[in-house]
Image (cartoon, rainbow, N blue to C red):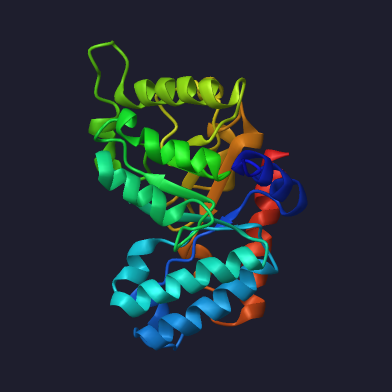
Amino acid sequence: MAASFVSRFAETRSARGPLVWGLDPSGRILREWGLGDTPDGLDRFADIAVAAAAETVGLIKPHSAFYERHGWRGIRTLTRLVADARDAGLLVILDAKRGDIGSSNDAYAEAYFGKDAPVEVDALTVHPYLGLGSMDTLIGRAHQAGGCVFVVTRSSNPEGRPIQTAVAPSGRTVEEALLAEIGRRNADLAGDGPGPVGAVIAPTHASPYLDLPAARALFLAPGLGAQGATAEDVARVFLDCPDRVVPTASRSLLASGPDPGRLRDTAAALAAEIHRVLR
């Protein structure tokens, strides 16, 4: 079995901090960078962004949608970006929010985890709407490959709150029930944890209180910068488990491009702020 994502994240966090750089090349970003909203512009973005990230942070999070919108050439660029980033020593979290049942989930597992995966990543975001149990094969393959599956539990968008705070027959809210289920799976796979099943917990929403340590998980924390969350919000929400939070920012960092020096400086400043509030 490969070294776990949890252990590799701990090493990366110790060496370079926990900040994840979201590499989300929207059409606006590509145009503002002067690259053009084209497959060629996307290719150039990948070269600049990976080089800047590799000198500044330890993790990146490309969002699949921004590459898929360019068709097969965009998917080719994403594949190359993932390989180049991992070769440079970066951990890659693919934000694809997959989630299905049966053989469809098996196919996602084969696509992203393991040495024979065509787009081999270190972690993947998934949706739990079809039930966490439907993802057992995906979770199992991620575990064997030393990867992680981040389950959307408390998202950064306000539209998600009515579903996530709905009360299940057990008396728990949906997000509480998901965290409990994540905790059981991690206990089975990794003992006291944290294990290979993480949770997406946005610091843009601090209430109601969630017992995060009980999930025995890492927590991907989107929403820094453009979506309104601050480093202090991250520290407050993850006060009980600061060493398990994986904070991510995208637009607020990419706005400094395309100059590599400015990109590095902006990311380094946020990384230092995150380190200060979480230490």
Direction top: furthest residue: 170
**Residue drawn at (24%, 17%), measured in percent from left and top?**
168
Q: Say which of 171 and 119 sits in front.
A: 119
Residue lying farthest to the front in this orientation: 116
Give the image quarter of residue 20: bottom right
Is residue 201 left or right of 162 when viewed as pictured? Answer: right
**Where residue 55 sits in the image (x, y, percent)?**
70, 69
Give the camera-side residue of 50 and 274. 50
Residue 242: horizontal and vertical position, in percent? 64, 34
Q: Residue at x 56, y 74 (%)?
A: 49
- Quarter of the image that includes the C terminus: top right
Would residue 100 be visible to someone looking at this image? no
Q: Which residue: 31% across, 36% down?
A: 128
Quadrant of image for the N terminus: top right
Residue 29 position in % (x across, y down): 41, 76
Q: State the residue at coordinates (61%, 29%).
A: 239
Above or below, comparing residue 83 to residue 27 in the picture: above
Image height check: is 44 above or below 177? Answer: below
| Residue 165 horizontal side relative to residue 33, left or right | left
Against 148, is 42 above or below? below
Residue nearest the observer in this picture, 251 or 25: 25
Q: Quadrant of residue 241?
A: top right
